[in-house]
Image (spheres, rainbow, N blue to C red):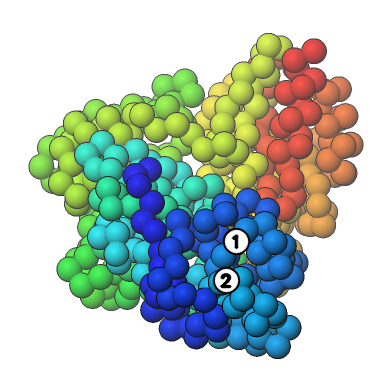
Amino acid sequence: MGKPIPWTTKEIREATKGNLLCGDMNSIFSGISINSRKINDNEIFVAIRGNVHDGHNFINDVIDHGISGVVVDQSKNDTLLIDKWGKKRIACVAVSDTTHALGDLANYQRKRSHASVIAITGSNGKTTTREMTSAVVSQKFNTLSTERNFNNEIGLPLTLFNLSKEHKWAVVELGMNRPGEIKRLGQICMPDVGVITNIGPAHLEGVGSMEGVMNAKGELLDQIKPGGTAVLNADDHRVLHLAGKASRDVLLFGFSQKADIRATSLKRNGMGSSFTLQLPSKSIAVKLPLPGDFMISNALAAAGVGYKLGLTPEKIKAGLESFKPVQGRMNIHKTKKGINIIDDTYNANPGSMEAAISTLKSLQGKMRGLLVTGDMFELGNHAEQMHNRLGSLTAKSQIKKLFVTGKHAKDVEKGAIAEHMDARDIFCGQKEEIIDELKEILKPGDWILVKGSRAMGMEMIIKELMNWEAR
């Protein structure tokens, strides 16, 4: 990780443009925290007002436990014990918005670390592409990567706070569910390289239309630093449209002849895949430890970044082949009873559903394929149509049985029946009911894909099936 860069009260105030209400400008802090339960004694506490909890309610608790610095919302000044804190030599900086201040602090950290930044966004594949890119870049450089799903206005700063003087690159993931969010995240991390994996029907509730999704993702391009590069998907017509308007250098990846970084000679090897990576300078064979053409697309994006950073084809290959699948994203479990379970429970939108179903279809071969699916969230007025389309796609994909749970289960069922799927092969119910039904009908050789939006908690089904299989 490298040695943490300490903070002074002066730097906190300079970064946030806040007002020092009490305390010493020269107080030193080892880091920044927003978690009152896990904060270290020598860190400064930033009180974030969230949807559920307000960090200001926990300030006295952290001070009682030895914290000597806080960043607060100036609107809360009248409720805080400033005089008492001053006597305790507590440093208190007041700002107009603590969430925005958190981003400003992260931007300050990004600048003073002198590391360069790769920022990745897209409707699908962000996390896998981020992990693949980190695996590639770290073959040559000391690299920091986003932890878990830290890709919003809170999570991105928490990642950047881990930057040290030893880091040469950081690979970060940018998520969004409303216009302007990618722009703000780009302002915080100031990317040298920006990657857009694809543009699909995700977060329609917040942006209204596919054009809205395209424009929101396209906000990244204007935030790339002058002299930087946009690594873009040549197979996605909306991304290509953005490429035509980009004011930065563009490097295209994909299967298309238009791509600078291409994949040819694709082969499926059991639960993995192989291809020839075509770089402008050289071609090299690559084996990925996971299935799916969309995974190859993610690998091409990572390879494009590696190529731009000057890595040799051999190091790019080594990085891609060392990649380990992210938990809940196309993890394949073969049970003692001979049942193949595909865990893709981390999240879902129409694009990722289509990619996962395509992978199931290719893996099942002549065996029986089953889909267990939950609601896709943040689709707004498009929800009924998109779930109906999911049912239709399932029926067309030679999947034998469909299990559906959630508010839109009947919409999925209607779509499947409209495409002539036998109603007797469709089961709608609660997760517990689906688990019981699966235990009754699963047999050796079956391939079962489990997928749904994060809040649906579809991993419960994976856990129950694995526990059942272990008996």
Position of residue 228 in the picture relative to residue 372 (left or right): left
Mark 1 element type: loop
Residue name at image x 36 percent, y 69 percent:
108
Closer to the camera, 42 or 83?
83
Q: Which residue is mark 2?
A: 90
Q: CA distance from mark 1 to mark 2?
A: 8 Å
Q: Position of residue 81 (x, y in %)?
A: 69, 79
The circle on residue 200 is none
Residue name at image x 80 percent, y 20 percent:
468
Q: Crowding near pointer 2: few (<14 within 10 Å), some, many (20+)?
A: many
Position of residue 263 in the picture relative to residue 33 (left or right): left
Discs 1, 2 touching: Cβ within 8 Å: yes
**Residue 435 seen by the camera:** yes
Q: Amino acid at mark 2?
A: Ile
Q: Position of residue 324 (x, y in %)?
A: 45, 31
Position of residue 440 in the picture relative to residue 70 (left or right): right
Quadrant containing the C terminus is top right
Res 327 → quadrant: top right
Location of residue 261 with respect to 18 vertically, above or below: above
Quadrant containing the N terminus is top left
Closer to the camera, 327 or 279?
327
| Sequence-first disc among 1 and 2 | 1
Q: Position of residue 201 (x, y in %)?
A: 56, 63
Location of residue 62 with respect to 253 vertically, above or below: below
Residue name at image x 59 percent, y 78 percent:
86
Mark 2 element type: loop
Q: Amino acid at mark 1?
A: Ile
Q: Position of residue 269 (x, y in %)?
A: 41, 22
The circle on residue 67 is 1
